[in-house]
């Protein structure tokens, strides 16, 4: 330990000495702004202003004039002079040579002297650009059927909304979701995107390379993207109210949504009361979808993957609304008050209750080296969750200081009950999974002389007390004993996390230097036992008793260098960390004390080829201890799976390399991105799965080196055709992973490979009709020891046809088609929904009648893949249902 400490301190001071000696000259960003007018002095909008270093060369920066004719271009060039090229649909192309300096120009432009076929003049262009901000005009993308702003965002080129509500730009999730420049929701932005009326929104702004900390705005480079919603009015009271009632063959139905919103320059608020039993999971609206970069190392652990649970059906690859037999209620309040130009206070609280019934059956196919085991399990489950969470956030953010204090609490009570039939016997299960957490995070950042100094601190307390009951027991936990009538597995966990760091930064011309010194402490306590009931007698199983403690200490120093010059940005992070883990179990009299000095460098390169193209490359290494799954005695995971993770402290190292290229051209509304990543992983442990012929699973850990290789190619192309108000897109992804796995005592190389193509189009067919279509073609292969064990092919299609007989009426028909090929089986299923809407103009109220699952399909078959396992799941569907009611935005 002493030698490691000496090496750590030596590397720390050597790092600081070498990097502190750097010094280069300053970088100058020029700002070219102006107004474009015609010969009569009238403002010209949608004019393209491109800065070039050569008259015929590529644009190094560009902007599009707004409705007042104003444009602003920020650029970086070493040339003595630059060329400003101005183009537009109705004007003569103009090129001006200007001195290379920040300046304001007034352009007087003449119209073309040759006739054009047809010109449609608009108040503002569909997509414009100002500096690092791309502006989408909502009215250009909005269609008659759109009600919420998410409906419009989904067809904007370059933007995409995932099934869980996450908004992506050029394939990457956004970091922040602002409304009029304020971050009201803190990552839970589905509540706004799904309820903010599109009619209240003027534009959607994409903030590229956005730095949310104003003090670091011109100092620390950011490659993250955020979204800002611009409203029609500076003072806006808006929202939506929805009330629907209906029936299906089993019960009466309701959908209620009352979500008022208020926005002005100093105060923002969103409240919501929602309830339904028609298939919508309301918890998705308050799910955190994005994390701030500044909090990357300060993420609060959650309870999404408990150690014990009942047997559940796998998550489907289609609309969850069709299989949820739910009763959901949600109440939430979000308030932000801006006390002055730099200080704001924010509060959030929500309460969500969710009941659901799950009907279906699963066929699990285990692809073993020498055999195939199939397990069929008809299942009926019931879930009941109460969830209370909240936070108070105090923030000071200006050019002189950044101070943030965030207090969060989370209380969740989750109950699961289920019955699964296995080999002719029904096994009843119930799990009680409560979870509590309390966390406080403090960040303080301000200049001290010519240095930037920051302090960060986080303290998190968590506790869980999980219980799983199985009746009867499928296997005996006590060797040599008959199967028990009842098994109870109990676990209690307590976690304490404390992370503290101090950092300083300095600007040396084109190089910015940051050094951070920190210490992390983590404490984990796990205690548990298993009890078997035989003939009315309880018996504790000694082999399943856990009583362990884990202490994790991490002292680190991180050096970060950022170099910026014109089109090139280089980032180099050189973190050194000395980590020690002390893990012991009083029952087993086991103690481990591994320690190591980790060096995890990261190098990033970003090159702006011109105003449209940008390339990115990244090389990194990460090595760390994995503490999540350590327990020295077995645990009954579910009614037929036992886990025994008695091993050395897991250690993982990952060498990762990736490249990405992106193209975005607001002038032609064309966006493209493609990326490739390659990772080599090395673990000091190897997972062993023993699958009995009956399908009983024992998962163990072996102290053996294990290597894995993962490749991923993905991309997206999207184009908006303004003349016919049509968006076309294509997503593609190829992924391959290769890893060692011990399966039934045989060491095997397991390869998982998948290819996915997802086209989509949203088109105005005529004045009275519009059509949206999306599809997905996927092939997934499982290869064991270089032999294809099995594969699944899937073809999914979704289409919606909208018909508008007049301005007040709307008829929509939605069609979903799913085709699966697995082994010699082909399953084809289709669903049709019908909706009629009549809109009263004064006041604007939508009266709706909808029929869902018209053909009353009662089951659905889906496939999922996981390492050497393929799951075929049959879900019982909600029966045909009728809903009638009113909905209006205000």
Image (cartoon, helix red, strand yellow):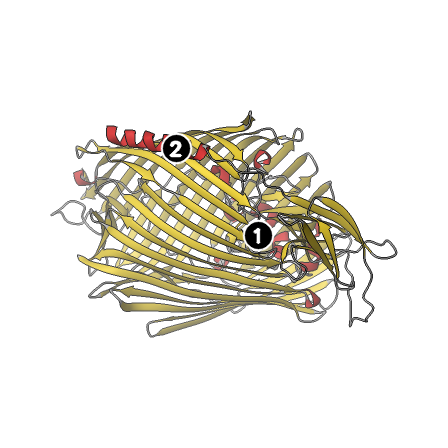
User: Residue at the front extreme?
Assistant: 80
Position of residue 464 measured from the top left corner of the image (x, y, whole percent): 36, 36
According to the picture, the residue beneath numbered tag 2 turns out to be 557
Left or right of 402, for residue 637: left
Cα–Cα gap, marks 1 and 2? 56 Å
According to the picture, the residue beneath numbered tag 1 turns out to be 254
Position of residue 292 measured from the top left corner of the image (x, y, whole percent): 51, 40
For image coordinates 41% across by 59% down, the residue present is 712
Seen in the picture, residue 464 relative to 779 is either above or below; the reply is above
For image coordinates 34% across by 35% down, the residue present is 577
**161 or 175, which lies in front?**
175
Circle 1 residues within 10 Å: few <14, some 14–19, many ≥20: some
Report the quarter where the N terminus lies. Answer: top left
Circle 2 residues within 10 Å: few <14, some 14–19, many ≥20: many
The answer to whether any part of residue 552 appears in the image is no
Circle 1 SS class: strand
Which corner quadrant of the image does residue 161 belong to?
Answer: bottom right
């Amino acid at each position: 330990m002493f030698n490691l400490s000496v090496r750590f301190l030596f590397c720390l001071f050597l790092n600081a000495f070498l990097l502190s000696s750097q010094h280069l000259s300053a970088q100058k960003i020029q700002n070219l702004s102006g107004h474009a007018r015609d010969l009569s002095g009238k403002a010209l909008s949608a004019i393209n202003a491109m800065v070039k270093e050569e008259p015929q060369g590529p644009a190094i920066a560009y902007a599009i004039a707004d409705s007042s004719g104003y444009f602003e271009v920020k650029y970086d060039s070493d040339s003595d002079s630059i060329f400003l090229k101005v183009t537009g649909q109705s004007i003569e192309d103009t090129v001006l040579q200007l001195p290379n300096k920040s300046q304001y120009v007034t352009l007087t432009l003449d119209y073309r002297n040759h006739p054009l076929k047809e010109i449609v003049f608009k108040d503002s262009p569909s997509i414009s650009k100002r500096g690092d901000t791309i502006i989408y005009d909502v009215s250009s993308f909005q269609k008659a059927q759109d009600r919420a702003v998410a409906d419009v965002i989904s067809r904007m080129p370059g933007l995409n909304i995932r099934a869980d509500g996450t908004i992506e730009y050029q394939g990457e999730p956004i970091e922040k979701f602002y409304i009029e420049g304020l971050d009201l929701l803190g990552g839970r932005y589905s509540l706004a995107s799904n309820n903010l009326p599109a009619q209240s929104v003027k534009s959607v702004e994409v903030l590229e390379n956005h730095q949310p900390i104003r003090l670091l705005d011109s100092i620390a480079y950011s490659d993250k993207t955020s979204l800002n919603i611009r409203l029609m009015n500076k003072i806006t009271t808006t929202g939506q109210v929805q009330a629907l009632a209906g029936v299906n063959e089993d019960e009466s139905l309701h959908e209620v949504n009352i979500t008022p919103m208020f926005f002005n320059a100093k105060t923002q608020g969103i409240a919501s009361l929602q309830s339904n039993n028609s298939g919508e999971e309301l918890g998705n609206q308050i799910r955190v979808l994005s994390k701030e970069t500044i909090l990357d190392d300060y993420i609060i652990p959650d309870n999404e993957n408990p150690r014990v649970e009942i047997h559940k059906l796998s998550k489907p690859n289609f609309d969850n609304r069709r299989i949820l037999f739910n009763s959901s209620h949600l109440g939430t309040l979000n308030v932000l008050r801006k006390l002055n130009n730099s200080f704001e206070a924010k509060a959030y609280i929500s309460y969500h209750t969710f009941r659901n019934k799950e009907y279906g059956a699963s066929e699990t196919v285990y692809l073993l080296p020498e055999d195939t085991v199939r397990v069929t399990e008809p299942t009926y489950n019931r879930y009941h969750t109460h969830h209370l969470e909240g936070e108070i956030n105090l923030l000071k953010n200006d050019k002189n200081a950044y101070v943030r204090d965030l207090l969060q609490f989370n209380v969740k009570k989750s109950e699961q009950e289920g019955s699964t039939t296995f080999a002719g016997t029904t096994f009843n299960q119930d799990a009680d999974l409560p979870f509590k957490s309390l966390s406080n995070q403090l960040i303080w950042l301000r200049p001290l002389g010519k240095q930037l100094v920051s302090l960060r601190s986080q303290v998190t307390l968590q506790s869980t007390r999980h219980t799983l009951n199985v009746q009867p027991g499928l296997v005996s936990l006590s060797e040599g004993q008959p199967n028990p009538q009842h098994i109870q597995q109990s676990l209690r966990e307590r976690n304490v996390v404390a992370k503290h760091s101090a950092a300083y930064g300095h600007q040396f011309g084109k190089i910015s230097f940051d050094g951070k010194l920190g210490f992390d402490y983590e404490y984990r306590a796990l205690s548990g036992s298993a009890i078997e009931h035989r003939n009315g007698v309880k018996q504790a199983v000694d082999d399943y008793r856990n009583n362990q403690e884990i202490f994790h200490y991490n002292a680190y120093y991180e050096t970060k260098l950022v170099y910026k010059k014109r089109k090139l940005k280089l980032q180099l992070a050189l973190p050194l960390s000395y980590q020690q883990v002390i893990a012991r179990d009083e029952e087993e009299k086991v103690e481990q004390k591994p320690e190591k000095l980790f060096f995890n460098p990261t190098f990033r390169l970003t090159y702006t080829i011109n105003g449209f193209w940008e390339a990115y490359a990244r090389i990194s290494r990460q090595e760390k201890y994995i503490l999540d799954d350590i327990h020295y005695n077995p645990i009954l995971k579910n009614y037929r799976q036992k886990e025994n993770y008695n091993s050395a402290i897991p250690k993982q190292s990952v060498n990762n390399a990736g490249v990405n290229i992106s193209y975005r051209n607001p002038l032609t509304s064309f966006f493209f991105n493609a990326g490739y990543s390659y990772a080599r992983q090395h673990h000091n442990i190897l997972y062993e799965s023993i699958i009995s012929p009956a399908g009983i699973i024992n998962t163990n850990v072996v102290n053996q080196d294990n290597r894995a290789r993962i490749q991923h190619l993905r991309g997206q192309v999207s184009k908006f055709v303004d003349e016919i108000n049509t968006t076309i897109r294509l997503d593609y992804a190829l992924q391959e992973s290769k890893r060692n796995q011990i399966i039934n005592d045989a060491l095997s190389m397991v390869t998982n490979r998948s290819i996915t193509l997802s086209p989509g189009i949203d088109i105005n067919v005529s004045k009275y009709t519009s059509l949206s279509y999306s599809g997905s073609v996927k092939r997934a292969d499982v290869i064991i020891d270089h032999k294809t064990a099995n594969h699944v092919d899937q073809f999914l299609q979704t289409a919606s046809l909208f018909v508008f007989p007049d301005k007040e009426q709307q008829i929509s028909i939605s069609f979903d088609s799913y085709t699966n090929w697995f082994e010699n089986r082909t399953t084809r299923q289709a669903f049709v929904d019908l909706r009629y809407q009549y809109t009263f103009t004064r006041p604007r109220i939508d009266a709706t009648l909808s029929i869902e699952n018209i053909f009353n399909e009662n089951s659905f078959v889906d496939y999922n893949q996981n390492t050497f396992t393929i799951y075929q799941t049959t879900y019982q569907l909600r029966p045909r249902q009728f809903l009638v009611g009113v909905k209006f935005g205000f």
